[in-house]
Image: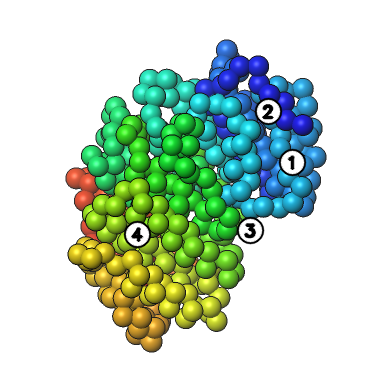
Amino acid sequence: MVKEPTHAPLLSIVVPVYGVEAYLYQCLESIRADIPAGESDAVELIAVDDASPDGCGDMLRAYAAGRDLIRVVHLSSNVGLGLARNAGLDVATGRYVWFVDSDDWLPPGTIAAVLDRLRQHQPDVLMLDHLRVHEDGRREVDASSPLLRGITGVTRLADQPRLLRVQHTAWNKVVRRDFMDELELRFFPGWYEDIPFSHPLLIGAEKISVLDRVCYLYRQGRQGAITSTRSSRHFDAFAQYERLMDWVARKHPDERLQAELFELMISHYLVVVGNDGRMHPHLRRDFFHRAAAHYRRYLPTDGYPLPPGATGLKHRLVGRGDWLAYSALRQAHRVAGRLRRPGPAAVDGGSPAADEEPGRRAGNAPTRDGALTPERRDALAGGRLP
């Protein structure tokens, strides 16, 4: 039974929970303890137990006992991250919704800053900065964080197109609930569920606000994270991009936008197919050919700006469906990477960003004037991550 709040809050924070017993308390406490005095009516926390196989369900029951601002939804069967978010959204009553993953947490002062910005700008989407936190405690600035700099007031994607290259995740955006409904957006099942959700938010928004402040601590290297799990479920990315492209074609049929998304899509596929931590060798050829089929299917009529250097070469190989040439190029980069970097090689040829998404963690850092260098543009699609 989910308790209904007495007053509609400004912000609903939805936390899907599955298999995170070691991290759950830290996440929940970082939210609850950060709500400013006098703002308890402005925030509700909705935790969704996605039939977690460990002790998370019992932890949530105990944590919510006696705390009115915390509401718990227990699902009878595991539905996955996207549909668990939907279950929380179904009972959320806030004007704005923020999806926080249960293995991550918030730094102090975050909620006060978020509430202040929501009241000040009343945006459709509020974008937030974050840090990546490694298991050894090391904190790392995201490569796309500079794209958030220097944006004051409210803006639109047409005025700040670089925002499309900020990590396409749900957790770095606070979204006006009515706006989400206007766009008919919900999460789909499967992995890479953020793809058809995050991009449309920015494309459709008339008012985007950017909070240039670290508001989220993103845990790296957790066992079970999709970026470090070999599985055929990485093929889910194809269905998610099909949903995105279908939405854009129906709602915003703009050729320049389609070209931009096309490049991001192919770059993303190259990151996935080239990463040993995600793609088992016996699946790699099939994934490459599926990417080539999407290349032919979605190639914009007037083409698209081909990335420079090795990245552009790999785009061409995908376009031709030339698996043998791509495989040879990938192997050459792996050997070169091992020769260049002393010590144990990182995943897939020694690049520390080999598991990163284009528009997420790798290769999107601009120069001071906001332009992407060829070297960073190569890293975007795995130019050094074959």
Give residue 16's position: percent from left, percent from top.
63, 43
Which residue is denoted by mark 1 in the rendering? Answer: 74
Category of crowding for the residue at label 3, using alpha-carbon neighbours closer than 10 angstroms: few (below 14), some (14–19), many (at least 20) = few
**Which SS class for mark 3?**
loop
Which residue shows up at 49% across the image and 32% down it?
A: 177
**Which SS class for mark 2?**
strand
Residues under labels 4 and 3: Cα distance?
Answer: 27 Å
Q: Which picture quadrant has residue 45? A: top right
Q: Earlier in the sequence, mark 3 or mark 2?
A: 2
Give the farthest residue toward the front.
250
Q: Earlier in the sequence, mark 4 or mark 1?
A: 1
Give the amino acid type for the residue marked by disc 1 in the picture. Answer: His
Determine which of the numbered discs, if any, sits on residue 223 in the image. 3
Q: Is residue 34 visible?
A: no
Residues under labels 4 and 2: Cα distance?
Answer: 38 Å
Q: Earlier in the sequence, mark 4 or mark 2?
A: 2
Determine which of the numbered discs, if any, sits on residue 70 in the image. 2
Give residue 158's position: percent from left, percent from top.
25, 42
Residues under labels 4 and 1: Cα distance?
Answer: 36 Å
Give the amino acid type for the residue marked by disc 3 in the picture. Answer: Gln
Q: Nearer the viewer, mark 4 or mark 3?
A: 4
Category of crowding for the residue at label 1, using alpha-carbon neighbours closer than 10 angstroms: few (below 14), some (14–19), many (at least 20) = many
Which residue is denoted by mark 4 in the rendering? Answer: 264
**Which SS class for mark 1?**
strand
Give the amino acid type for the residue marked by disc 4 in the picture. Answer: Leu
Q: Is residue 362 above or below residue 269?
A: above
Which residue shows up at 45% across the image and 53% down it?
A: 195
